Amino acid sequence: MSENKVVHYLKDYQAPDFAVAEIDLTYTIEEAYTLVRNRMMIVPHEVGRPCVLDGSAELLQIVLNGKCLSPHEYAIADEKLTIHTVPDTQFELEITTRLYPAQNKTLMGLYESGDNLYTQNEPEGFRKITYYFDRPDVMSQFTTTIIGDKRRYPVMLSNGNLIDSGELDNDRHWVCWRDPFAKPSYLFALVAGQLAVLEGNFTTRSGKEVALKFYTRPEDREKAGFALESLKHAMQWDEDRFNLEYDLNIFMVVAVSDFNMGAMENKGLNIFNTKYVLASNDTATDADFEAIEGVIGHEYFHNWTGNRVTCRDWFQLSLKEGLTVFRDQEFSADRASRAVRRIHNVRVLRSMQFAEDAGPMAHPVRPASYEEMNNFYTLTVYEKGAEVVRMYHTLLGEEGFQKGMQLYFQRHDGQAVTCDDFRAAMADANGVNLDQFALWYSQAGTPQIKAHGDYDAHNQTFSLHLRQFIPPTPDMADKQPMVIPVKIGLLDKNGASVAFKMAGTADKTEETVLVFNQTEQTFVFHDVAKEVVPSLLRGFSAPVRLDYPYSDADLMLLLAHDSDSFARWEAAQTLYRRAFASNLDALASVQPLPQHAELAQALTSALNADIDPAYKAVLLQVPTEAELWEDVSSINPEQYVCARQALLQSLASSMQDTLTHWREWADEQERNSRHHAPQEYHPDLAGVRSLRNTLLQWGVLATADLLHNIVNEFSQRATNMTHEYGMLAAINHLSDDKRNDLLNQFGQRHAQDDLVMDKYFILIGSSQRPDTLQQVEKALQHPAFSLENPNKVRSLLGSFSRNIPHFHAADGSGYRFLADYILRIDEFNPQVASRLVQAFNLYDRLEPQRKTLMAEQLQRIQKDEGLSKDSREIVDKILH
Ligand code: PHE
Ligand code: ZN
């Protein structure tokens, strides 16, 4: 079945045989194709080696030191071009290829979107453009000339600075860009077409004037304003917190609607999915604004962590991604609502990355092998990778961490390096040993900690016993104990913080970070005068699961009083889990469902406490199904949805008055807001609105006329997209026809807005209404839908694949439907298809009937003759 499988191993890394002193590219854009002439100055590292270049484009000509090569002097096989004999010293190699961007639906390499041309080269797209050493440790200086029709391609962009331009006959023109920084091919970018530009500027702290340019379709220009402001904030923040300045005179961002991922950090020329650039109050929710700020920050921060210092090979991807996610998380947290942001990130990690780590695709933050690199842009590399970086920060403190960063840049600016180099910089700058920490890069699976505590009144000590266990994953059975920072505080039975002394320290403290690095360890807290409840893993100080035998009363105490906002929220999460578990038991034994009166009481008090509205909203988050079944096998997904829904229902009913009170309060707040125009994005208002929308979702469960209120007041209340979408999301699962009416009106009102239509498709794909599959099938025919646009596929089919009751329908219809579309999409965009395949990751852990149904569909995909290696790698791993 998979005879041609090629597995790449980290252990096989070999340094490149050649260096490229310079690369000079000329793109000639013609009506039906683009010619690329690639002239390289190549320097052999060792004599006598054949010159092997990566590439798959149509090859027109090879010229070596001015002499055209004849076919016997080279060979082409498996996307490699081998030139048998090359000079021992520097030589010039000129290769000409022909590309057909309009036919390229993979959205990798050079492709057309609208009538414009764009590139995407990370990780291995450059080989679709020309023949090159398409690996990140070959870095070179790029000069790019673009020739095209003046009217069709008035704007022609590439990396670095515009150094020259001119006119040609036949209404054509040319531009020449030069990037003074050596870079690998994956950071190369080109854009050509009709684009409007929104401009701004930024003066760096050393006085460099930087022109900021956002390129969009002409009708979208004004919608880039928020992104432009975000960029200025990001540039300022990187100077203030990381001491890092921008290094070119121009920074460009181009928005394109056909894009496989979120955005791309090409040097000086970031290319973004429109979703992360364009926003207005009528088209974007507060969450969209926040995501834009975060992604703009992320890509900008890559300029240092990714571009100035890049990866030696793709196994090291987390070197740039984990670090840059950490940096963008800190940027967002410094901008506003640190506590709520942290909780949001932890929730994503736990419901998605933990699931990945417990499934067939489990891999370490630095994978040891891959078949298709595109499959390793994962939650593990990005989100767990960011947690790994955060642990350095937790262990070393802000100052120590920044010392490490400085040493890292001092040593490695302009180089392609490894995660070990980063770890060494952190260790050496702080004079500490971080050898054991390396296990975070090589061992997959979520560590589990079992904890228990003993209070000794006589000695006035509290002892905390910790035991760790790293579960086996498909790649590795036996694992070593890891270094786990456990941030901890103690509370007395009234909820007051209790100071303590650790052995060997002179001063009392109220919080400490335990360095837990053995299989089993006991930590003793001295001078503890009374019984205490430990507040553990504060701030989620490590990406682990921790189990402590708290009583419900302990948890309620933490929920009410813990000074750490993560630990407080976590106490509520544990209470929800317990309540959920008792519902599941009751349903299984056909007993009446418990009422959870105490939990309702604790939540009511928490809501009535004097805390930030956005934090109230996150307290009302019940763990997702994926979190609830994280340590379960033989899952019946339907039961999880029922037991969870019943929990929401009973809490909503008993808390009805409180919920209504706070909903009305939120409305009032917004009406009275004097400081900000009420329809605009502002973090304070966003918090109020997020509380209001959360309360609407709870409200429809318990208050029968809420639907009617929403319908009657819809147009009056829909003053911005956060409200409009919030109301639709709240009623999205209701079977009432009014839901369809409102949704249809929404679809008509925004028919012209590509990004709002994504929301329309998300609502359809994620509804729990019984007719959802029919509605999804109908939506596939909608004029605004396109299988070739990844955002549309993710909105409709991606949301359906996460729609538990429908995707996991007992008759197998959800599995079959998704498999049909995976096969269709795989024919032209393997990257998007292989993401969808991962909806089947739960396969091995499902109850037998669904497992059989899933197996049929997985086998159908696996048998497909033309299946991409992207999708094949995933299916093979699921079925193993
Ligand atoms: N490197 C991009 C980022 O910032 C992600 C990306 C990967 C984009 C591959 C396109 C293709 O995370
Ligand atoms: Zn990134």
Image (cartoon, rainbow, N blue to C red):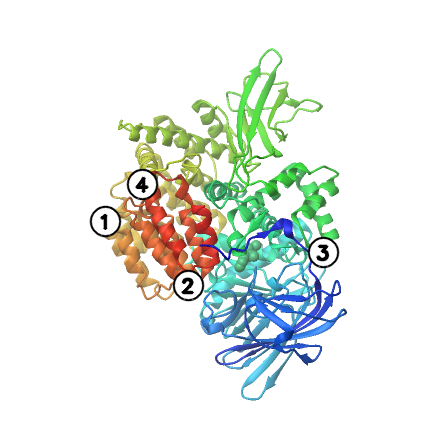
Number of numbered discs on residues:
4
Distance between the alpha carbons at the discs numbered 2 and 3? 41 Å
- Mark 2, residues whose alpha carbon is within 10 Å: few (<14), some, or many (≥20)? some
Q: Earlier in the sequence, mark 4 or mark 1?
A: 1
Residue assigned mark 2: 827
Q: Earlier in the sequence, mark 4 or mark 3?
A: 3
Distance between the alpha carbons at the discs numbered 4 and 1? 32 Å
Question: Residue at horizontal 43%, vertical 64%?
Answer: 828
- Mark 1, residues whose alpha carbon is within 10 Å: few (<14), some, or many (≥20)? few
Q: Which mark is residue 736?
A: 1
Q: Position of residue 404 (x, y in %)?
A: 71, 45
Q: Which mark is residue 849?
A: 4
Q: Quadrant of the N terminus?
A: bottom left
Disc number lying in front (1 or 2): 2
Q: Is residue 685 left or right of residue 432?
A: left
Q: Nearer the viewer, residue 271 or 44?
A: 44
The residue type indicated by label 1 comes to: Asp
Q: Position of residue 55 (x, y in %)?
A: 58, 67
Picture quarter with ligand 1: bottom right
Question: Residue at horizontal 69%, vertical 24%?
Answer: 507
The residue type indicated by label 3 comes to: Asp
Residues tagged 4 and 3 counted as in contact (Cβ below 8 A) = no
Q: Position of residue 394 (x, y in %)?
A: 63, 38
Q: Is the residue marked 2 within 8 Å of ligand 1, measured from its CB? A: no
- Mark 4, residues whose alpha carbon is within 10 Å: few (<14), some, or many (≥20)? some
Q: Residue furthest right?
A: 89
Q: Quadrant of residue 424?
A: top right
Q: Is the residue marked 1 within 8 Å of ligand 1, measured from its CB? A: no
Distance between the alpha carbons at the discs numbered 4 and 2? 30 Å
Disc number lying in front (4 or 1): 4
Q: Is the residue marked 3 within 8 Å of ligand 2, measured from its CB? A: no
